[in-house]
Amino acid sequence: MESISIEVDSEIAQVYQAKTLVERQKMQIIVNGWLKQMLKQRSLDDIIDDMRSQAQENGLTQEILDEILSEDA
């Protein structure tokens, strides 16, 4: 895997940097999957379905995702 830089607002950067390594890895899986799908220019519904499948294959359950999202709110 290679690294790239993406600009985000300061709040996102601060929250991301404060997360544990495991949490950051989970977010990287999500972002990586999203970018792959966006580059293929598929429908949003197809992208969401594929990301959900990939996340589950990598151990990211809906419960874990809900917990991650609720922590940021």
Image (cartoon, grey):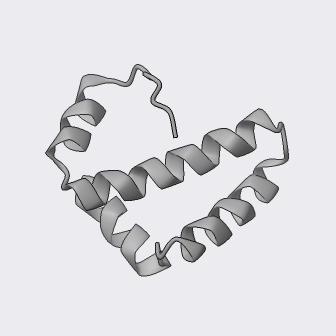
Judged left or right of residue 38, residue 3 is: left
- Camera-side residue: 1 or 63? 1
Name which residue lies at 47% across and 25% down. Answer: 4
The reply to whether residue 73 is in sight is: no
Numbered disc total: 0
Q: Is residue 38 above or below residue 29?
A: above
Which residue reaches farthest front? 1
| Residue 2 percent across, percent down from the top left | 50, 33
Residue 42 lies in what quarter of the image? top right
Residue 46 lies in what quarter of the image? bottom right
Name which residue lies at 14% across and 45% down. Answer: 18
Name which residue lies at 28% across and 61% down. Answer: 22
Judged left or right of residue 24, residue 57 is: right
| Residue 20 percent across, percent down from the top left | 18, 55
| Residue 30 percent across, percent down from the top left | 51, 53
Judged left or right of residue 12, residue 28 is: right
The reply to whether residue 9 is in sight is: yes
| Residue 68 percent across, percent down from the top left | 32, 63
Judged left or right of residue 68, residue 60 is: right
Name which residue lies at 65% across and 60% down. Answer: 51
Q: Is residue 44 above or below residue 13?
A: below
For the C terminus, give its image quadrant.
Answer: bottom left
Q: Is residue 67 above or below residue 4?
A: below
Which residue reaches farthest left? 18
- Camera-side residue: 28 or 66? 28
